[in-house]
Amino acid sequence: MNEKENAFDESVFKVITALNALMTDTTVSKSSKAVVKINRFKIWLSELWDANKTDTDTPDTNENK
């Protein structure tokens, strides 16, 4: 894993952690609409993170040519 990927992983982790804290905040948790929007964003971000991991785990087939 290179430095750019490591920085991306770290940033996504920090954002997801912050979103979890935000969703448990009493002001935000009073609004179910806000919690749903935050959760949808968190799911999208997790899917992006997983897709990035999958892309970087597969070897580049052009290297062998």
Image: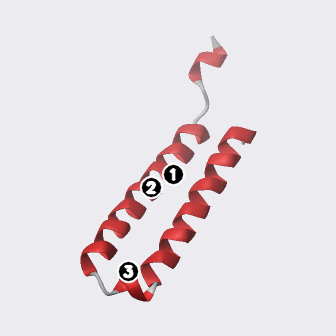
Q: Specify the label residue 57 is tagged with.
A: none
Circle 3: element type: helix
Gap between marks 3 and 2 measured at Cα: 20 Å
Q: Earlier in the sequence, mark 3 or mark 1?
A: 3
Q: Please provide percent x and percent y for residue 37.
A: 30, 66
Drawn side of residue 64 relative to residue 29, left or right: right
The reply to whether the C-beta atoms of the residues labelled 3 and 2 are less than 8 Å apart is: no
Say what amino acid the circle numbered 1 marks: Trp
Q: Is residue 22 above or below residue 13?
A: below
Q: Is residue 19 above or below residue 28?
A: above
Disc nearest the viewer among 3 and 1: 3
Q: Please provide percent x and percent y for residue 16.
A: 52, 65
Towards the viewer: 38 or 58: 38
Towards the viewer: 27 or 39: 27
The residue tagged 1 is 49
Gap between marks 2 and 1 measured at Cα: 6 Å
Say what amino acid the circle numbered 2 marks: Leu
The reply to whether the C-beta atoms of the residues labelled 2 and 1 are less than 8 Å apart is: yes
The quarter of the image holding the C terminus is: top right
At x 37%, y 68%, the residue is 38
Say what amino acid the circle numbered 3 marks: Val
Drawn side of residue 21 relative to residue 6, left or right: left
Drawn side of residue 59 relative to residue 30, left or right: right
At x 75%, y 40%, the residue is 3
Estimate how packed mark 2 is, as few (under 14), some (14 to 19) or many (20 or more) residues with alpha carbons within 10 Å.
some
Location of residue 60 (image quadrant): top right
The residue tagged 2 is 45
Gap between marks 3 and 1 measured at Cα: 25 Å
At x 36%, y 69%, the residue is 39
Q: Please provide percent x and percent y for residue 23.
A: 43, 78
Residue farthest to the right?
A: 3
Q: Specify the label residue 28 is tagged with.
A: 3
